[in-house]
Amino acid sequence: MTEQEIIASIALTQIPGVGSVGARNLINAVGSAEKIFSHHAELTQIVPGITPRMMEMLSSPQALLRAEAEFSFAQKNKINCITINDEAYPSRLRECPDAPVALFFKGNTDMNALRVINMVGTRNATDYGQRICRDFLADLKALCPDVLVVSGLAYGIDIHAHRGALNNGLSTIGVLAHGLDRIYPSVHRKTAIDMLENGGLLTEFLSETNPDRQNFVKRNRIVAGMSDATIVVESAVKGGALITADIAQSYHRDCFAFPGRVADEFSIGCNNLIKDNKAALILSAEDFVKAMCWDADSKAVPVAVQRQLFVDLTEEEQIVVDILQENGDSQINSLVVEADMPVNKMNTILFELEMKGVVRVLAGGMYQLL
């Protein structure tokens, strides 16, 4: 991704009234964020309904200047600026209609890990909730050692999820409701620094952005969107964890909850999720792994398929098979780049290969050669 495209993508987030959905629609209509600014005078012909006020904002240098300053800040502080079309962008999040067009990441983990979960809950975690985080992640490490754990670095369940992941050698990402020029709450700075060594910090917000109330809801959609499943550990009758669960459902992602005693204040939310069939009840990591159909038995040996017996592969199908054979499990974006094919053609080829029993789809949109 070019520096100009990154800066233009950041600038697009600074145009009032555009929003994540509008920004993505503009990029899809014009072809790139850079073209939106360089060809803004032609937008009325390309994008029906674009307002004069938006045209005025796009023609102003203000947003681009702010974006250039943010890009310089990111480079100075070794922060990765990731646009929505980058291969490093969380592919699960990209599937969501309101995904941010630009993200800022500092860390060392792959956000497109094979298995990604988020653990969320009340800021007033009880001993019961803390024990669930600790035991669940220890058991999950034994069953699925490659899981990436996402949460919001907040008080309570969030921070215990991050610490439980670190204690068990699992990568963990904290999604922030502010820029990467600060850590909120500041008492979690030590954990945040530790996460940079095995995970990282992620945000859509520019530096100098305060952790205002509305930003936490925006943060929650990233937590839900970049994960295969949401796990609610403890929640009162209202709270951010329930918002994350609702968002996960709207994205058609799996949602789970640990039950609690009916009289416990911080179990009411979880019990209601289960009662209303908005979340599946789990009691252990084993329950979760079975529900997700994640084959965690590393000793299981898949039945080998003699690919040389497939004589009906087309030339393009063979190209994809060769790439998978050389690179191993791959996401569609990687295959598109390697094969130099349009994404719609790659979708068709992968579907045909799946029907022929040559590949299978894994969690996270990964394709595996059989």
Image: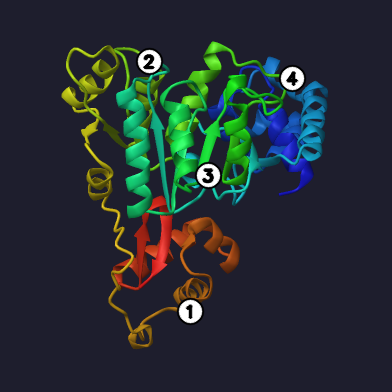
Q: Is residue 274 visible?
A: yes
Residue at coordinates 32% horizontally, 54% vertically from top-left? 143
Q: Quadrant of residue 177?
A: top right
Q: Where is residue 47 in the image (x, y as percent from the top left)?
A: 61, 31
Q: In this view, does 153 lie above or below 348?
A: above
Q: What is the secondary structure assignment of the residue under circle 4?
A: helix
Q: Distance between the residues labelled 1 and 4?
A: 48 Å
Of the numbered discs 1 and 3, the one sitting upstream in the chain is 3
* Residue at the spot of label 1: 315
Label 1 and label 3: CA atoms lie apart by 30 Å
Badge nearest the viewer, 4 or 2:
2
- Mark 1 vs mark 3: give the one in front: 3
- Quadrant the C terminus occupies: bottom left
Q: First in sequence, mark 4 or 3: give its number.
A: 4
**Mark 2, other Cα within 10 Å: few <14 / some 14–19 / many ≥20:** some
- Crowd class of label 1 (few under 14; some 14 to 19; many from 20; radius 10 Å): few
Q: Mark 2 points at which residue?
A: 239
Q: What residue type is labelled 4?
A: Met
Distance of mark 2 from mark 1, alpha carbons? Answer: 54 Å
**Residue 90, disc:** 3
Report which quarter residue 156 is drawn in: top left
Q: Earlier in the sequence, mark 1 or mark 4?
A: 4
In the image, what residue type sits under mark 3? Pro
Give the CA distance from mark 4 to mark 3: 29 Å
What residue is pinned by disc 4?
A: 57
